[in-house]
Image: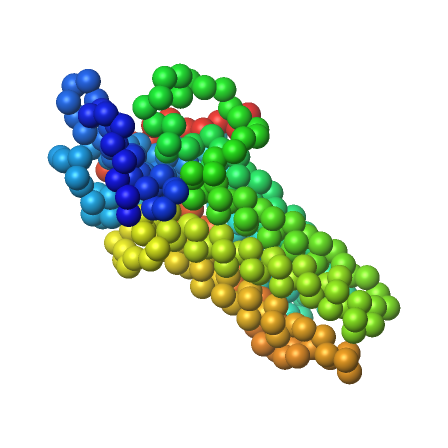
Amino acid sequence: MKKVDHGSENQQHQLGPFVTWVVELQPHKQTLLLTSRRQRKNLAPLPVASADIDPNAAVRGIRHHWTRFWGPRRIGWWIGVLFVIGSALFAIGGAKGAWPEENFLRWVDPEDLGWIFFVGSLFFTGAGYLQWLEAINGDVADAGKAGTLRRRWRYRGWRLQNLGYVGATIQLVGMLFFNLNTADAMISGLGWVGEDVIVWTPNMLGSICFLAASHAAIMEVSHRYWSWQFRSLSWWITAINMIGSIFFMISAVASFVEPREVLLAEWVANFGTFAGALCFLVAGYLLIPEQFELQKESKGSVSID
């Protein structure tokens, strides 16, 4: 990790080219720590005793409202809700494919699976777009600059020094690939070549994007390439997302269509989709209590209306 000083009142800390946290010395001499993820999520800066504080240690004492579920004026709340709905639909589709005869799945018509996956992918994309907006409007590298506290809401921009922006952009691209994959999967009459080119290839590309985005999120939270932070809710969110991305990649590999027009490993493909979606559902839910802290108050909710 590289530390870059910009005068005594603002110090940026970088992981490669990415700014992951900033230390500010306020006029009343209080030292504040702003991390990339907390800035994106519009959470309060952390008062610390020293400019050399470890950001991973600073977040350990934070507690959350686990039973507070309503926060529609926060963009992070909507991201969590959309991820939960999209993940639930993918989990239903994957479970039906893996265990088609189970009684608790009898209500799901196999002919509707294509639409279940497609609609689920739209919820994913909606969450991904809001996540991208969140990143361009909450760049920690802007901390301390004049005019950043009351700026207008931005709908486009480049934040290439922000790991949250890089991860959100890659994940949004992956979601668009999944939109294409789930839409093309409803086309009938494709041979094995057509299945692999227009259905399997977007699936594989989307899974690669999810893996890359998940690692970017872990780096952003860890302030290094990897860390173990069992007392950090944000770390758990990124770690569970990484596990979900791995399951999606397993599913994508297993869904390759062989020349005899059968999947390479059909049950594995469906189970990977189910398990990955379950991980994303849990991580999506955890995004909601992440918004509501017991010990630290939010800087102010982000309104999207």
Number of numbered discs visible in the structure rendering:
0
Question: Is any part of residue 271 visible from this angle?
Answer: yes
In-image side of 166 versus 31 (left or right): right
Residue 234 visible here: no
Residue found 17% across the figure and 35% down from its top: 51
- Tell me the quadrant of the picture where the C terminus can be found: top right
Residue at the image position 49 percent from the left and 62 percent from the top: 244
Tell which residue pokes out farthest to the left in this image.
49
Answer left or right for 148 relative to 266.
left
Q: Is residue 293 left or right of residue 58?
A: right
Q: Residue at the spot x=75%, y=65% of the render?
A: 197
Q: Quadrant of residue 48?
A: top left
The percent position of residue 286, horizontal first and vertical second, equals 41, 50
Q: Position of residue 203 (x, y in %)?
A: 65, 62
Task: Classify residue 248 by image quadrant.
Answer: bottom right
> x and y percent of residue 261 in the render?
77, 78
Specify the farthest residue to the bottom.
Answer: 260
Horizontal and vertical percent position of residue 295: 24, 37
Please, which colouring scheme is shown?
rainbow
Point out the residue furthest to the right here: 189
Res 230 → quadrant: bottom left
* Vertical placement of residue 195 versus 88, above or below: below
Q: Name above or below for residue 177 compared with residue 64.
A: below
Q: Is residue 77 above or below residue 92?
A: above
Q: Nearest the camera: 277 or 15?
A: 15
